[in-house]
Image (tube, grey):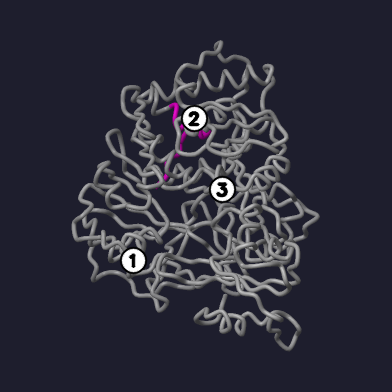
Amino acid sequence: MSTPDAPPTLYDWFAASAAAHPGRTALETGGTTLDYAELAGLAETLAAHLHQRLSGQPPFRIGLLAARTTVAYAGYLAVQRLGATVVPLGPSFPAARNATIARTARLDAVLADGTGPTDRLGVPVFTLTDPELRRLTAPPLSGVRPAGPDDLAYLLFTSGSTGAPKGVPVTHRNIRAYLAHVVPRCAAGPGDRFSQTFDLTFDPSVHDMFTAWGSGATLVVPTRDEILTPVRFVTARALTHWNSVPSVISLAQRFRALRPDSMPTLRSSMFCGEPLTLQQAAAWQRAAPGSRLENAYGPTELAVTCTAYRLPADRADWPSPANGTVPIGTLHPGMELRLQEDELCVRGPQRFPGYLDPAHNAGRFLAPDGGPYDPAVPPTDAHWYRTGDRVGPAGDGRSLVHLGRADQQVQVHGYRVELGEVEAALRALPGVRDAAVLPLATPGGLELTAAYTGAPGTADDLRAALRDRLPGYMVPATLTGLETLPLNPNGKTDRAALGELLGVPGRPS
């Protein structure tokens, strides 16, 4: 069910809980615990500080180069308090990639916490450590126009097939429709404790922050080491609500940590970003038998997730799709679907208004009647977004099951990766003539493997050069030099034959 009188903006979701539960714990990160009144105070002061540093001019978009610190979360709220759009940058991303995002997003400034490089951004950078934030003072904030429903709440950049990251703007109206459904569905309140396993550059982080803060609950942020030991993190921090990519389950299984009843505090577990297998779900359920287990699906363009499937409490009642994955369920309220040759196309209040660069809209929408989209026309609410995901019936008459991609996009540890972007980065390196990249299933989740032609040096040289251009999750785990890439009768790269050469089982999709 959804809440018709839901707060209109992201900041309003937090502010409502801060007003109702000022003394309740809102955030635990890096050894710091803040109640709602304290976090609201830091966000207000930081917003006023940013406003003052920008000469009292209302900001348009502010980059947030921060990770798992108080500055990161107070900063996210401060940008929302200013009525501006938050644009997360990756502290672990190459400086060139962050610079490209800063330029493409037309940022007014960047707020940083010192965890990532700030050179080459081309805009004013305001760096604060957590201790400096606690000592910060600023005059009262005034003259700031609050955000409206059609203003952008956040702007994320996903992998682009042309070789450059692609901007996905999400409005307050989009994310409000999402939260109005999922906050009541979480059935949480003060005293509950939510995980925050995702980086701010990945939109499930929005789910974690604002389902917690929209419920008066606590957001508990793990360290990098704690992410690698999820069962220990859950039990040591007494978490009640969990959200992560399914590969975390595989990681825990490798370390034999998923013992029966090892996570007794969990009441709700959600997985998203990758297919959740029935085997993974069963292993997690045994370790957390008191937890509801939910599989959620949705691209960034549809405001976090647009479908969900909650597994029955009794394992005997679970579905058994032929591909061994948990169904992705049914659409959230207000969303509509259209199947176009098994490709899932969606419209509704969560659908984004179109890409930051309108040129990226070509091929990604259908006309209201299902016909071809005219890229010269901005998308309206009636246009269908083409997800690129193939789906089919799960067997219960209502739910959908994910059947793979209709293109060369894959999910690596939950992050969306266009194989074409990695290939373009490889081809741009000196000495590389051609390149092809394939997904490779491993016990720890999906990785990338690549083949190249030319004489660019060693594979280690190539990998080091790619790390200067791409985030770590996009750098292939293996690189193989070939005389030529295998071609099909049409003269295109034969990915099936290449997969056999590289030891990739099955036909690459």
Q: Nearer the viewer, mark 2 or mark 3?
A: 2
Q: Quadrant of residue 86?
A: top right
Q: Mark 3 belongs to which amino acid?
A: Pro
**In the picture shown, does residue 433 fall above or below 68?**
below
Image side of residue 40 versus residue 315, left or right = right
The residue under label 2 is 71
Q: Secondary structure at mark 1?
A: helix
Using a 10 Å C-alpha cutoff, classify the residue at mark 3 as few (fewer than 14 neighbours), some (14 to 19) or many (20 or more): many
* Residue 387 visible (yes or no): yes
Which residues fall within the magenta stretch? Answer: 1-15
Q: Mark 1 belongs to which amino acid?
A: Gln
State how far apart marks 1 and 2 are (Cα). 35 Å
The residue under label 3 is 349
State how far apart marks 2 and 3 are (Cα). 31 Å
Question: 346 and 89: which one is in front?
Answer: 89
* Residue 5 visible (yes or no): no
Check contact, mark 1 vs mark 3: CB within 8 A. no
Judge whether residue 290 is colored magenta. Answer: no
Q: Earlier in the sequence, mark 1 or mark 2?
A: 2
Q: Nearer the viewer, mark 1 or mark 2?
A: 2
